[in-house]
Image: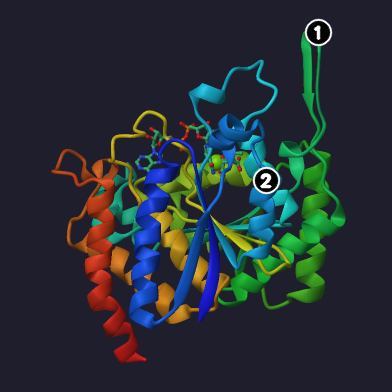
Amino acid sequence: MQAEIVVLPGDGIGPEVTQAAVRVLREVGERYGHRFITRQHLIGGAAIDATGEPLPAATLDACRKADAVLLGAVGGPKWSDPQAKVRPEQGLLAIRKALGLYANLRPVKPHPAALGASPIKPHLLNGVDLLVVRELTGGIYFGDKTRSGDTASDLCTYTVAEIERVVRRACELARQRRSHVTSVDKANVLETSRLWRETATRIVRDEFPDITLEHQLVDSMAMHLLAKPREYDVIVTENMFGDILTDEASMLAGSLGLLPSASLGEGRVGLYEPIHGSAPDIAGRGIANPYATILSVAMLLRHSLGLEDEAKCVELAVSRALDDGQFTGDLAGGRPAIGTDAAAAAVIRQLQIECHAVVMRD
Ligand SMILES: NC(=O)c1ccc[n+]([C@@H]2O[C@H](COP(=O)([O-])OP(=O)(O)OC[C@H]3O[C@@H](n4cnc5c(N)ncnc54)[C@H](O)[C@@H]3O)[C@@H](O)[C@H]2O)c1
Ligand SMILES: CC(C)[C@H](C(=O)O)[C@@H](O)C(=O)O
Ligand SMILES: [Mg+2]
């Protein structure tokens, strides 16, 4: 097949991890005979520096025309002045909104070889396989913001339609898994959460009677996620809770550098990105973990291009690289660590074996 993929490196470690992931994508293309055309565009701080805007029209245009978008990360101290009129993060929020990407899939499946990197006891992690479906285009990140004198406000709004579509998406995904959905809210305090809970209950009752639905308040969820992570299958939640819970969940996997994501809507184009940020503390040193971005490429192959074999192949290759002890610094825990490029090379080496193995098995 031929596919056009827009690559948005962004800021900090964004260019380093996307470059590694594009190398892997190219290898997949060569081995399977696909023509993946990649074009880079500006977003975030890099775009502000070049054009004054965090999401230039040319970038959005290119994304709309593409088959999929691969993003690194945006933001950094250079653009973080509280007085700044434009911020890199606005570019990311704007592209998600403009492409209608309301469902952000963040899978968490700790890899056995990386268990040592997690602060959680290994016996709690065995068998953990959960998927957070984070609502991505509503809630407090998108509400009106005001500042007047010594008072500031951020408005949190949800409509029934916004809740319905993401809950439906979570239930459809749960049907392909263990048919269990945990809906996370703060219904004891927030009106948006009461609407969320009512809507989730109705959608599951009327449309997904085969799904088991459980409600959980977000504060205790933060605790349960670490205390009994094995008990969760699909977790669906609003934008901010999903943002926070997934950084927490990365500790189950051992590092933020291991969690990929797919942002999907009703449209054709999906956006794929690691869940981590631009990591200014390690940027420019060639030591960032690229596995989350490489695993995001696997999600891109699966969800936007329908290339399931190729997606599995990338996931297996990452898994084998970890089995082989190919750890970046965030996973190494004092053992010798490899850099970003070497990690990509390790995946490519495994890909050369794994692609073949997956094809032969099918
Ligand atoms: N999707 C995005 O573009 C995105 C996501 C989160 C944060 N941000 C932005 O990134 C900037 C920095 O935010 P932050 O420091 O709170 O979060 P961060 O995710 O960038 O970093 C948190 C910690 O995790 C480490 N880390 C993150 N990714 C890693 C990787 N791939 N390999 C090794 N270590 C990794 C960092 O070194 C840091 O110590 C901010 O401007 C924030 O707004 C962007
Ligand atoms: C940078 C920020 C806008 C972003 C978010 O909150 O969505 C990030 O934290 C993420 O998780 O992708
Ligand atoms: Mg986040």
* Residue that appears at 71% across and 46% down: 57
Kind of residue at badge 1: Gly
- In depth, the one of 259 and 181 nearer the eye is 259
Kind of residue at badge 2: Asn
Residue 315: tell me if it is visible: no
Residue behind mark 1: 149
Expressed as whole percent of the image width and height from the top left, the position of residue 27 reads: 33, 70
Residue behind mark 2: 239
Proximity of marks 1 and 2: CB atoms separated by less than 8 Å: no
Question: N-terminal of the two: label 1 or label 2?
Answer: 1
- In depth, the one of 148 and 32 nearer the eye is 32
Distance from the alpha carbon under mark 1 to that under mark 2: 28 Å
Where residue 360 sits, quadrant-wise, is bottom left
Is 279 situated above or below 32? Answer: above
* Residue that appears at 57% across and 30% down: 49
Q: Is mark 1 within 8 Å of ligand 1?
A: no
Residue reaching furthest to the right: 160
Where residue 218 sits, quadrant-wise, is top right
Residue 28: tell me if it is visible: yes
Q: Secondary structure at mark 2?
A: helix
Expressed as whole percent of the image width and height from the top left, the position of residue 184 reads: 66, 50
Expressed as whole percent of the image width and height from the top left, the position of residue 229 reads: 46, 54
Expressed as whole percent of the image width and height from the top left, the position of residue 285 reads: 29, 35
* Residue that appears at 57% across and 22% down: 80
Q: Is mark 2 within 8 Å of ligand 2?
A: yes
